[in-house]
Image (cartoon, rainbow, N blue to C red):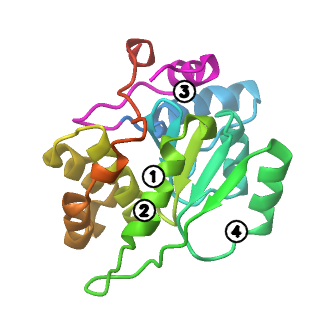
Amino acid sequence: MKLESSEVEICTAVVGAPSPTGQISLVAKVQGSVDEADRDGEELFVPPLNFAMVDCGVFRSGFPDTANFTFLQTLGLRSIIYLCPEPYPEPNIEFLKCNGIRLFQFGIDGCKEPFVNIPEDTIREALKVVLDKRNHPLLIHCKRGKHRTGCLVGCLRKLQRWCLSSIFDEYQRFAAAKARISDQRFMELFDISSFKHLPMTSPPSRRCQS
């Protein structure tokens, strides 16, 4: 995938590249700069819960609130994929309007096992948005950034030809004790054949890893 210059700048300035064996969180880097910012009296940048980079131009997190808006501005987002059925809060809507960010809402109920129903068609539609580079940089989020976000990212990883063990490892890293067998089963059975005609998100470039 050819990267836009703005996307490359985000990758190099904000976070190191992810790999099939792990995900690099920004929290440690941001936390490391907190003390320095306090000393200098500068504005602090607070990432949303469970924030991480998925690929160049693609990010994931839990639900961002007003404390996270300044941080999100540094990403230069064009789009947000929201995976909950509830209406987007008014402060968040105003943030999107002020920053020219497009909202894609794919309402998936946050059910608990054993009554989990992951709508495959909805995941497919959301994936099409993720794969369209015109929507990048893009943030994927649900409430906690664990299950619904994890399923969408896991299906993207299948398109990127990750092995299942690496997909599950990434999912479990974010879901932790809340990991669901049903989510992992969904990712395992997800059929990517219908996406063969669409361009796939490529692995990060070497520049992203620098």
Q: Is residue 124 magenta?
A: no
Label pair 1/2, CB-CB below 8 angstroms: yes
* Marks 3, 1: nearer the viewer: 1
Q: Which residues are magenta?
A: 1-23
Residue 183, horizontal then vertical, whole percent: 27, 67
Query: Earlier along the polypeptide chain: callout 4 or callout 3?
Result: 3
Query: Earlier along the polypeptide chain: callout 3 or callout 1?
Result: 3
Q: Is residue 128 left or right of residue 17?
A: right
On-image quarter of the C terminus:
top left
Whether residue 51 appears in this view of the structure is no
Towards the viewer: 20 or 126: 126
**Callout 3 crowding tier (Cα within 10 Å): few <14, some 14–19, many ≥20:** some
Query: Earlier along the polypeptide chain: callout 4 or callout 1?
Result: 4
Q: Residue at the spot x=58%, y=76% of the render?
A: 85
Pointer 1 residue: 127
Q: Amino acid at mark 4?
A: Tyr
Q: Amino acid at mark 3?
A: Val
Q: Is residue 141 left or right of residue 96?
A: left
Give the vertical position of 59 relative to 81 (above or below): above
Query: Earlier along the polypeptide chain: callout 2 or callout 4?
Result: 4
Q: Is residue 189 left or right of residue 115?
A: left
Q: Residue at the spot x=69%, y=33% of the render?
A: 76
Pointer 3 residue: 14
Q: CA distance from mark 2 to mark 4?
A: 19 Å
- In the rendering, which numbered label is found on residue 161? none
Q: Residue at the spot x=38%, y=13% of the render?
A: 206
- In the rendering, which numbered label is found on residue 123? 2
